[in-house]
Image: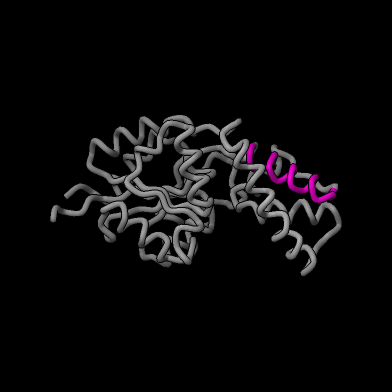
Amino acid sequence: MGELRRGAIFDLDGTLVDSSADLIAAANAALARGGFAGRLDPGPDAGVSGRGGRAMLRLGLARSGLAGAEALEVVEALYPPFLLDYDGMLADRTRLFPGVEACFDTLEASGWALAICTNKPEGLARKLLSALGVLDRFAAVLGADTLPVRKPDPEHLHETIRRAGAAPGASVLVGDTVTDRETARRAGAPSVLMDFGLSADDPHALKPAAVVTDFGALAGVLEGLVPRK
């Protein structure tokens, strides 16, 4: 068996792609179908989209005057229609952040294994990555439904690293939210948080190993955290 590679493990939404407009459009469609008046705004509510479909639906229901246990039940009823709506529009306005593919080129040339660890359902993650032309860049793609657990459970990250053929002690989780920071902490791995001003969380307050605002700088940061042997 060859030596395990260093692993650059990426979150997807808000980290590699700006998917907020499509996610919010799908949430609003599900709310409308359910007869609820509350809506999300793609501008100020962009950060909420990074917390997932249920978080967006809860916000829409709160704006419709529904909260508590009743709201939680409605969220679960609206979630499957939300996924169906999102499946039909997931790449309408979603784009890779600038510099992503050039960063991948640099990391791959240095021997890093690339992988995805996301709380988006795996099928939707693969479909989106394929639509954006980057699915084949990843040695592994694990979503919210790939395993019995998902982020922030550390096993989601551990298994992503294993399937990518990367070394557990030489892998970094690149994300954008407190969920990513907590996942890495529990897994005993360093985290780097991307800050494009879209996250609902303050990345600096989360104290990751580094905060990066430009994919042009990410490869150098990762090399500093896990130098080539």
Give the camera-side residue of 208 and 41: 41
Report which quarter residue 67 is drawn in. Answer: bottom right
- Quadrant location, the N terminus: bottom left
Vertical arrangement, residue 226 with respect to residue 154, above or below: above
- Magenta-colored segment: predominant secondary structure: helix
| Magenta-drawn segment | 22-36
Across and down, in percent, residue 144 comes to: 51, 57
Residue 35 lies in the magenta-colored region = yes
Q: Quadrant of residue 91?
A: top right
Q: Position of residue 81 (x, y in %)?
A: 69, 49
Q: Position of residue 115 (x, y in %)?
A: 36, 48
Q: Is residue 16 above or below residue 81?
A: above
Which residue is farthest bottom?
69
In percent of width and height, residue 49 lies at 63, 47
Left or right of 216, for residue 5: left
Q: Quadrant of residue 214?
A: top left
Residue at image point 77% right, 69% down: 69
Front in this rendered view, residue 220 or 186: 186
Nearest the viewer among 190 and 49 is 49
Lateral position of residue 71 relative to residue 104, left or right: right
Q: Is residue 33 left or right of residue 102?
A: right
